[in-house]
Amino acid sequence: MWIATYPDPGDPKNLNYVLWKHGLNSDMDLNTALATMTHDTWAVNRVLGLTPDQLKERFGYVKTYEEARPYLQLCATPNAIGELGNSPHEHNVLYLRDEDWMVILKNGRAVDLVLCKGY
């Protein structure tokens, strides 16, 4: 019944995504998971408290500020980073795969997640 009710892989209620976000679906296509996160009300919970190594394990790979494309680098502004007071050059941001998600780190752990759209 659940599968028939939420067949769209981009729906955060899709069974594959629900299982993945709880660590129970290692076969989830990670690009689809990241695209689905844009519709997940609490997407930040997918990253909170994770270290850079744990982020790599969870999402396959991450990119540093220097590795990110220029468009995504624009996302790492003081407004997006907030009161952390660090510059992106101090390695306090990581980007998830080639997608538009920026993870803000403090003391080596993820504290926020920003969807980089409209920069």
Image (cartoon, rainbow, N blue to C red):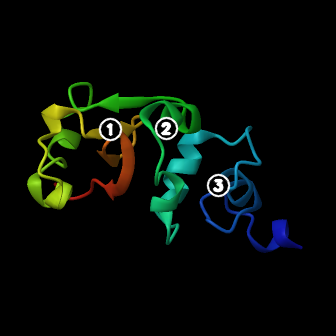
Name the spot of residue 80 as percent of width and height, x first.
19, 57
Examine the image and state in which quarter residue 21 appears. bottom right
* Amino acid type at image mark 1: Leu
In the displayed structure, would residue 74 be above or below residue 13?
A: above
Q: Residue at x 48, y 51 (%)?
A: 47
Left or right for 33, reference 65: right
The residue pinned by badge 1 equals 94
* Amino acid type at image mark 2: Leu
* Amino acid type at image mark 3: Lys
Mark 3 or 1, nearer chain start: 3
Name the spot of residue 89 as percent of width and height, x first.
14, 32
The residue pinned by badge 3 equals 21
Examine the image and state in which quarter residue 115 appears. bottom left
Looking at the image, is mark 3 or mark 2 nearer the viewer?
Answer: 2
The residue pinned by badge 2 equals 55
Q: Nearer the viewer, residue 115 or 84?
A: 84
Mark 1 or 2, nearer chain start: 2
Q: Are marks 1 and 2 in contact (CB under 8 Å)?
A: yes
Examine the image and state in which quarter residue 111 appears. bottom left
Cα–Cα gap, marks 3 and 2: 13 Å
Please tell me the numbered disc located at residue 34. Answer: none
At numbered mark 1, what does the secondary structure look like: helix, strand or loop?
Answer: strand
Q: For the N terminus, give its image quadrant.
A: bottom right
* Mark 2 neighbour density, 10 Å: few (under 14) some (14–19) many (20 or more): many
Cα–Cα gap, marks 1 and 2: 9 Å
